[in-house]
Image (cartoon, helix red, strand yellow):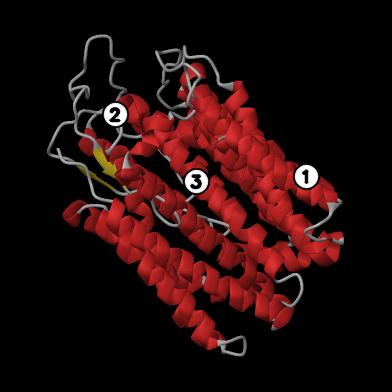
Amino acid sequence: MHTVRNYLPGGSSGLQRAGAACRFPRVTLSGPPWPVVRPERTQHCGAVPTELAPGRPAVPHDSRARWTLAAACFGFLMVGLDATIVNVALPTLGRQLGAGLAQLQWVVDGYTLMFAALQLIGGSLSDRLGARRAFVVGLSVFVLASLGCGVAVSPEMLIAARFVQGIGAALQLPSSLAMIRHAYPDAERRTKALGLWAAAGGGAVAAGPVLGGVLLIALGWRSLFLVNLVIGLGGLLTAAMAAAAPGGGAAGKRRLDLPGQVAVMLSLAGLTFGLIEGGTAGWTRPPVVAAVAVAVVCGAFFVWWERRVPDPMLPMGLFSRPAFSSASVAGFVLNFAYYGIVFLLSLFLQNERGDSALTTGLVFLPMSVATTLSNVVGGRLSGRFGTRLPMVGGQFVFALGLLGLLLAGPGAPDWVIWLVTIPVGLGCGVAVPALTAAVLEVVEPAHAGVASAELNTARQMGGAVGVALFGTLIAGAFVPGLRLSLLIAAFALLASALVTAYWGREPRR
């Protein structure tokens, strides 16, 4: 849901420039969308041996590697937390800032939209600047934007700051994975490091609604954003001790694909604007029609351009591989359902049922715990049975949880909601970790960064569309819109599970 991953969900945000070593680790993501890993026994054609190859940077000292991991975990924790922590504060923001439903949707989607739109170019900038430098820049932008959120005096100011937060997240998340990849060249050690990194991000996504409820009651809504100053300071201090990851390699010398980046940003922004504003202003209003037209035209141009440009931001040939395409679809749908439902439940519990922010956060607690714990299980399932089983089974269990919510009805007591949301967390935690592993298994090491960035883009865009669409459905009548949203999300998950079952076969080695 929106969160977080991805963060509630899902989501997972999100992820992953891991795995260019000869023994490709299978990365798992937690949470709504985040990682655990297993090393493979076979080698991929063209992979670099685990020992240092000629010209390869020296292995960082163990202490530097640990500082690198700590910095990456701080960054991922902050990115995941902000995907979901704001949801429980939406009713309060509506009252104190005078924000309407559409503006509340933009508070959530402004962050996710920029995060999604800039993921691909964020990985390229990391290659050009060096991972640690790009990480510090992204983290600094995120912290300053969080300060802007914390001092916002109007919905417009808050939304603008959330957009900037998304820019910082898009730069620092790919960089954090690149830092880990450089600091841990050995596949087995990198697997353990990625497990800790995944736990930080996935746990933050899952814990966001609960922590948000506590902070909101104790310190007010501004504390939900100002807490990032403390987390960000920890990230910056540990990054100063981290191993320097060099930039300017072969990937870093490639030309930036600015037309492609502009096209994808306009397409995603047009789609999100059309969905949000269409539900409140009307679908036939000229701005809404124009936004949808821009989304379609720019999306078509992006595909056309990426097929022809010498250095594409996203090599379209990757989608010719069924396992890659099915994992991308699954990532989109998981966050579509997770972020969207967290957004709706936060509003429903407080605005329709009259629950407090703290009670609302606690309602999400069983689901959050299930998400975090099942991430470990999902990683082990992927390691033993391959990625397809946890991806299919996780989406199926997630869908059953949503159908349980639908059957429970709006008058169900809190303990019933606790029970039926546990499968939501279990399904997400099992499925999302396998996504990155599935993507990385079918791409060459040279494309590992762009492939993982594409997966993150799909997941984050799924969350943005979920919030936008479901918010539109409740604009007229909340409870009927909530029921329809649950039905759509469950159907989308079941359909995606079938696609994964058929197309998500792992490649022969």
Residue 458 tag number: 3
Question: Who is closer to the viewer here, 334 or 210?
Answer: 334
| Residue 249 locus on image (x, y percent) | 41, 13
Cβ–Cβ below 8 Å for labels 1 and 2? no
**Nearest-to-viewer mark from 1 and 3:** 1
Task: Give the residue type that dot 2 points to.
Answer: Glu
| Residue 427 locus on image (x, y percent) | 38, 66
The residue under the point 49% across, 61% down is: 206
Question: Who is closer to the viewer here, 241 or 444?
Answer: 444
Q: Label 2: which residue?
A: 444
Task: Give the residue type that dot 1 points to.
Answer: Ala
* Residue 275 in sight in this render: yes
Sequence-wise, which precedes: disc 1 or disc 3?
A: 1
Q: Residue at the left extreme?
A: 41
Q: CA distance from mark 2 to mark 3?
A: 20 Å
Q: Label 1: which residue?
A: 290
Sequence-wise, which precedes: disc 1 or disc 2?
A: 1
Q: Seen in the image, is 416 located left or right of residue 377?
A: right
